[in-house]
Structure formats: C-alpha cells, structure tokens
Image (cartoon, helix red, strand yellow):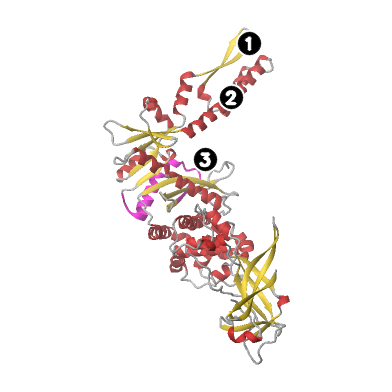
Amino acid sequence: MFLRAHARDKDGKAHSYWSLVETLRTARGPRQRTLCYLGELNSSAQARWLKTIEVFNEQGEVQQLKLFPSQIEPPADDPQVARVLVDQVRLERTRQFGACFLGWELWKRLELDRFFESLVDDDPADVPWSRVAAVLAINRLCAPGSELAIEERWYPSTALEDLLGIEEGKINDTRLYRCLDRILPHKTRLEQHLKQRYGELFGAEFDVLLYDLTSTYVEGAAEQNPMMRRGYSRDHRPDCEQLVIALIVNREGFPFSYETFDGNRADVTTMESILRMVERKYGKARRIWVMDRGIVSEENLEAIRKRGGYYLVGTPRRQMKQFETELLQDNWIQVRPQVEVEQIAIPQGHETYILCRTAGRKEKEKAIRNRFSSRLEEALQSLQKTIAAGRLKDRNKMERRLGKIQARHSQVNDLFTITLRDTPQGVRLEWEIKKEQKAWRELREGAYMLRTNLQAHSTQQLWSEYMQLTEAEASFRALKSELHIRPLFHQKESRVKAHVLVAFLGYALWVTLKHSLKRPPAILPLPSAHGVNHPQPLSPQKALALLSTLQSADIVLPTTDQREIRLRRVTELSPAQKTLLHQLGLSLPDRLNSQLKCSADSAIA
C-alpha cells in the first residue's frame, strides 16, 4: 500500500488530494485499487482556501487539523498544522465491515435493539446484554460459529466493536453463554414482536400457515439433555442423538413460531401440541394450515376442524388407489407447462381431493424404478448362478440371502414375485414381474394427491397454495446451510434451546434481507454511471458475500513532531456495492466510534 497524489484545479488554484491505494494482480496485469481517500495535504500558499480535516481525540472531542507533507513549509504559528511524513504512512487494524454492518442495520430495522434493551438491559453490565444478543445473531447470519469461535476468531476480525460501541476485549465465550441464558425466557414475546414487525415492514399476513419439521443432531453424549433421542434423521446421521424442530412460516417464508420436540417424536404426533401453542400465543382464528403428508392423520385433521380452521394437506400415496379411475380420465386442467390437476368432489362430504401430475416428477420416478428394478434382477441372477453352481446348498442360507436382497431393494420389491422352487435338479430361484402392480405403478408415477376442506377456492389456486410449502422447506435449507443450525455442541437442554433461538434470530435477519432485496428502492434509482443494475435480485448469500469485501481500517499518519494521526476509514465502495446499499436504503456512517487509546492528538475520523 502507498499514497497517491491527485492534482485538481479549482477556482484557478491547484489542489493536491491524496488516496491510499494497493496493488492487485489481475488477469490483465497489475492494477491499483483505491482503499480510501484522505483528502488534501495543504501547501502553505493554499492554506487559506482549503478545508481542514475533522478529527476526534480519545475523549471524543472534535479537532480541526490542516495536514501538510513534511517537505512543505506550513504557515507559521498555526496550532492546527500537522506535518505528515508521507513515506511512513501505514495501514493498521483492518476489520471486516460490510457484512456485519448489514447485519446490524437489519437488526435495527426489525427494532430488535429496542426489544432486547427493554427486556435484558435492566441489570448493570460491562456490555449491555442487548448488544451481546446482537453479536450472536449477526454471527449466525454472517459466519456461523460456536461461542468460542466468536471470541477467538470472528469477532476480533470484524468492525462490530465500532458499530456497537463495545470496548475491546469485552466479548468472550462466558459472556456469550450468559447471554443465551438471558434471552431464552423471552422466546414467546420475540415471536410476537417479529410477527408485528413483518406486518409493518412488508405487509406480511399470517392467515395461511405452512407447517413442517426437521431435525438437527448433537455431537457428544448429551447425557444432561433428556430431549436428545435417536429417531428418524433427516441429516442422515442415525448414529447421533437428535432434536426435532417444528417451524411455522407464512406463505412468504416469514417466521410465525417454532417449537422443539424430543428427537424420537413422530411428526404426526406434534400437530395437537402446535395447535395449542399457537392458540396460547396468538388466540383462536380461522387459519389455513398447509402441511405435507408426513404430519397428516385423521385425528390431526379433526383437531383443526374442531377449532374452526382449514387445511390443505398432502395425502399418503396408498389412498390414491381408490381414485384409479380418475387417474385414467382425460379431464385434467393444465396449470403449468408440465403440471396438470384434477378436482374430485367427495359425494355428501365436506372435503375436496385434488389429483396432481407433474411430467418432470414422472420421468424422475420412472428412472428410479427402472434403476432399482435392474439392480434387483442383477442381484437375483447372481444368487441363482451361485445356487446353480452348487456353491450354496443350504436352503435356510438361500432364504436369508434372498431376504437381504429384497430388503436392499424395498422400493421395487412389491413389483416382483420371487420363489425358491424345488426341482429334480435341485433348488431353483425364479422370479417374474407382477404386470398389474407394474401397470399401477406406471399410472401413479408423477402423481400425488391433495386434500382440503376449503370450498371457495379454484383447483389451480389450491395447487398454488400447496406449492407454497416450499417456503417452509427453503426456511429449513437456510437454517441448515447458510445459518448452520447443525450440528449441536451444547450438552444442556437450556443451552440447546437457546442455540435454536439464536438460529431463529439469524433466520429473522436472513428473511428480512431476502425480502428487502426483492422490493424496489424507496428512493430514486442511481444514474447508470454510478452503479450496476442487477437484472435479478441478489440472494441473501450473494449480498452478504458482495459486502464482505468492504473493510474498515486505521490509516496512521506519522508527523514530524512524533505524533500519530489515526483516520478510521471504510474502504471505497465498488459500483456493485453502491447499488446494493442503494437497493437496501442504507448508507455508510459518517464516522466510526472508536475505543482505541491514542496519543492526545491522535484522531479517529
């Protein structure tokens, strides 16, 4: 890095401006990138026309200084003069600024700073607990890690110390753990606050609720946590104990509520608990519940009906057999290029069934069936050769081998009739495809069925409503991929629940960013020369990555009188970063607060 001078004529006078630049290697050769502008270094003849630079000492008091290169003789007897040793200028204390600045602005946009200040800042502390909660949530959004990783690696590398006004060295894992204990009791009030803010910011409505479950596993024995159990693992980690998480979002993915269950809790048994929990928090209302078939049972649907609610749910495939005739009919309605639906009204009933068929899904299921059928037949042929060669003579062993083959290919086992037949030449393995079963499988491939007690909706509208369940699935993908809710390392039940709460806070910031990127800017668009227009909205992940290159740093200007002037600056915005901040309605702060101890005349801009 080095200083570069820029000359400019203004009002008939020559002015010299300085910037800090660095050299980068690119495909086109070495290039120089401007980190930040320092302003003017005066010459004595120009001093009366030039603006002084505002700096702040360690007490926060404003000072006015005129900066001169050391080789220029400044005006005599001027206490505001500082002569800079240009060849000794250096850069210190570089910090990641852009992503954590965005996280802090999203935190304030949701008014979570005020929310937590009113609940957890009553007790005196070196660092307000509301700010520690912000650190936890912003970390979950930007670079998810453990409390120890936050203390040792992530937090010291960010500018949150300046943004949040926290003194250096005050964030440690003990304080982070204590914060987890303090925010957990406020889970219900937090959910209610977020629901209100999403309504105010985005006009979000919560009349349609998408309900789904996922699981996350724990590393370690977790002997002090009775909730950790072995169950169906969606993370493909049956070797680990796990926790089940139920999440409720609206049709746009805004979170409504969540709950945690024991790791061995069956999905279908959670619905009654969720209904009672929602009524306790938000009162009774005629809500529409959208769920997949794993949560559906007659008892659950009856519980929704008793509360005056509505449902739109998937059904188990075995129930499609009774509608085989409808599957063969030609009165399907095309709602998308590759999607067809057919409505079936149940005589003297209060429900409607909707058959749906997707061409892409049909091809996928057909390919899966053919692949597993081929593998099953190859395994049967291998076993038959072994039997025919006399290498396997014990019938009990033959049956065990056959059972293992059928278990490995359970997806297509019902399509085959397999027998061990005694013949004069010995035992022979025979198999054949069940033609009727295969025909039925081909007919139902690509098809699924929905069930609802909604009456005034069109078939296309009902299908579209059910497809919004993908928003709940997207929420889980964000929690697991971007926000890294898995795996769990906490061993105590309260800490595990608090970890999930922090992930929920991270998701609240993530979904706020997602929808802020979708809506048009509140102010006039930038001229094309000042920015880059994105044809499609950036994803939250790409927006955070784009801003992650934005840094803050201290530019240290040594002077001839053995002082050091520190200018804390944010690196120059790229055109894409300018456009992104404009899209989000954000602007960089004029200056950063600093807790750094400097010499009496040192300054932080």
Instruction: Name the residue that disc number 1 marks.
Output: 426
Instruction: Name the residue that disc number 3 marks.
Output: 232
In this rendered view, identify the residue nearer to me: 151 or 228: 151
- Where does the image place residue 215, in percent across and percent down from the top left? 51, 46
* Lower sequence index among marks 2 and 3: 3
Q: Which amino acid type corresponds to the residue marked 3 in the rendered image?
A: Tyr
Q: Which amino acid type corresponds to the residue marked 2 in the rendered image?
A: Ser
Specify the segment rendered in magenta: 259-285
- Where does the image place residue 204, in percent across and percent down from the top left? 38, 55
Position of 90 with respect to 502 (left or right) is right
* Lower sequence index among marks 2 and 1: 2
Measure the C-alpha gap from mark 2 to mark 1.
Answer: 26 Å
What is the quadrant of residue 551 in the picture? Answer: bottom right
Q: Secondary structure at mark 1?
A: strand
Q: Is residue 391 above or below residue 516?
A: above
Q: Residues within 10 Å of mark 3 (few under 14, many from 20)?
A: some
Measure the C-alpha gap from mark 2 to mark 3.
Answer: 28 Å
Q: Which amino acid type corresponds to the residue marked 1 in the rendered image?
A: Gly
* Residue 314 visible in the shown view: yes
Position of 209 with respect to 167 (left or right) is left
Q: Which mark is residue 443?
A: none
Instruction: Name the residue that disc number 2 marks.
Output: 374
